[in-house]
Amino acid sequence: MRRQFDDLMLGSIELFCLAAEAGSFTAAAQVAGVTPAAVSRSISRMEERLGVRLFTRTTRSVRLTEGGRSYFEQCRQALTQLTEAQREVMGKQQEPAGTLRISIPTPYAHHRILPLLPAFRARYPAVKVEVHISNRNIDFVEEGYDLAIRVRVLPDSGLIARHLEDAALVVIASPGYLQRAGTPQALEDLQQHECIQFELPSSGRRIAWLFKDADGKEQELLADGSYCCSDDVLGGVTLAKNAAGLFQTYRFIVENELADGSLVEVLKPFAGRSRPFTLLYPHGRHVPLRLKAFVDFLLEQRERWSI
């Protein structure tokens, strides 16, 4: 095999990645313990060798070009693999380590994942966890995430998908609302009730309520109401708790409120529907141990979630 890189070139790649992550030659220089001028010269040599401009430079900032962004993602993956291969050979990667970046929808974060993180870190203290809480679909490569949990999965997304649970749905209301408006007994009764809506921020589409009829046939209804929440399902729960109307949500979110009576389940004969939550992470020949450990840890929890 002919040698492709000398020590200087490998060092330049590392400086390039530091500058790309920090968005600053000065910040990269501080991390590397060199001068900003040295970082600038190193990256200029790389650009000359590659024949591609990697950064757009201004007096105040540096920003990756399209080609630079693509090169950065490849270089970052390569450096990560080299680092972890070295740790494995040296016997230092017997336990997962490093920073794990995960993206989770709001309800699943608060009611499922965040309560588990102290136990995960107690098992793997060398792993740091950064949590992005939002229903927004993230770009794994562009934004540098290791893992995401989502309700809807694109069939051709090119991601590894692991099923976590089918989360049961329930229609809820406060005792005060039911006293004022009455309790619906059939699906047709929803037309006379205030039905709190949830809107998908990605499409602006309101989500249909899911039911099973007396024969077990699945039904989807577009209920109507004066309230609509976007992005955060917990907003609908809060409205329901304050007597704004009926709301369909995940049972695991309102278990405590149903138990203490501050919320009441309605339309029980028509329950039985659910939505799946799925764990997603990119394909790759080399999966970091911290990611593998977290995936295995979450899959252990499925028994607790009544899968």
Image (cartoon, rainbow, N blue to C red):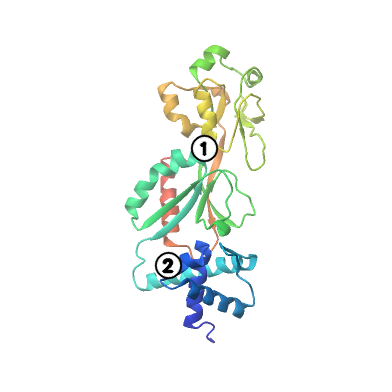
Amino acid identity at mark 1: Ala
The disc, 2 or 1, on the residue closer to the chain's N-terminal end is 2
Callout 2, which amino acid?
Gln
Which image quadrant is residue 221 in? top right
- Who's the residue at 53% across and 62% down the image? 23
Label placed on residue 144: none
At a point 45% along the width and 53% down the height, the residue shown is 295
Q: Which residue is mark 2?
A: 30
Number of marks in the rendered image: 2
Residue shown at 60%/80% (left/top)? 49
Q: How far is mark 2 from mark 1, CA to CA?
A: 47 Å
Q: Residue furthest front?
A: 59
The residue furthest bottom is: 2
> Observer-nearest residue: 242 or 81?
242
Q: Nearer the viewer, residue 248 or 106?
A: 106
Q: Where is residue 224 shown, x and y percent of the image?
A: 66, 25
Which is nearer the eye, 287 or 303? 287
Q: Which residue is mark 1?
A: 167
